[in-house]
Amino acid sequence: MEVVVGGLFHRHLHPTLVETSRGARLQSVDPEAVLAAVLPPGDPALTELAREFDESWTRLRSRVRDGLLFAERTAFLRGEGWILYALARRLRPEQVVETGVANGHSSFLLLEALRRNGRGRLVSFDVMAGAGELVPQELRSGWDLRILPQRGRAAAFRDAMALLGPVGLFLHDSAHSYGWMELEFRAAWARLVPGGVLAADDIDWSYAFLDFARSVGTRPVVLVEASKPFGLLARPAGSPVSLPATPHGASERA
């Protein structure tokens, strides 16, 4: 009984930046250092790609206006946006999946990266119709935006993920409850290709990210920007597909 109660209590706690640092193989305020820790060894210099990102970021910010559906505080920060864009460009994934579209900051950057790659599609999940207002029409041809139902959304998300092919890059930025994060991470990891990356925003909202990293035997890399940690887990080549069993009593509610 004490173990179950302790486990439930743990699921409602929030890790500190000291704890995320201890669990990570690198935690840094420098996006370049974080990228270097995740991308394959010997990756070419990112200078030209950084200029390309600057153009995309400026274009994205020019589309931000009053009256958007979601508050500006939901927006991706520049550093994490740069990491996400660079990963999409360097990994050249055939399929990217994100959860939590909001106004579409991350969607815009991912779609722009895939457009420049000349390949790949983005599958995005949200629960609100009207999400993704910042994404222009010319980027939407490679976009599969799915609105999950308010009721039964855990099952709907699991079923949708089960039908997707291999995923090269996954981004979690939806509900940050322990149960929902755990559900997403397990579904994503089962589809993630060797060398692919699982990214998660706001990993200090619960222990789900740190616990999941330990469960698959991989230490994350963490960017801290404006006191907000953004975590990355790279799937090692040859890592097993099977996942540990869901802990007893785990909840899938947001």
Image (cartoon, helix red, strand yellow):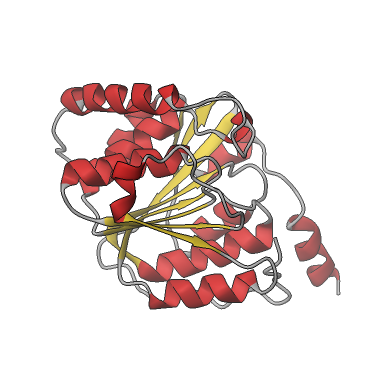
Q: Quick check: 132 above or below 162?
A: above
**Residue 245 locus on image (x, y percent):** 56, 78
**Residue 64 locus on image (x, y percent):** 49, 26
Q: Quadrant of the C terminus?
A: bottom right
Q: Is residue 100 left or right of residue 96?
A: right
Q: Residue at x 49, y 41 (%)?
A: 133
Query: Taking the image as drawn, is residue 200 in sight?
Result: yes
Query: Quadrant of the rendered structure where residue 59 is?
Result: top left
Q: Residue at x 70, y 71 (%)?
A: 151
Q: Residue at x 16, y 24 (%)?
A: 48
**Residue 207 locus on image (x, y percent):** 64, 52
**Residue 146 locus on image (x, y percent):** 48, 62
Q: Quadrant of the N terminus?
A: bottom right
Q: Is residue 100 left or right of residue 93?
A: right
Q: Residue at x 52, y 30 (%)?
A: 224
Query: Quadrant of the rendered structure where residue 79 is?
Result: top left
Q: Is residue 148 left or right of residue 160?
A: right
In front: 166, or 19?
Answer: 166
Q: Quick check: 147 above or below 138?
A: below
Total number of numbered discs in the rendering:
0
Query: Taking the image as drawn, is residue 40 in sight?
Result: no
In front: 153, or 221?
Answer: 153
In front: 93, or 58?
Answer: 58
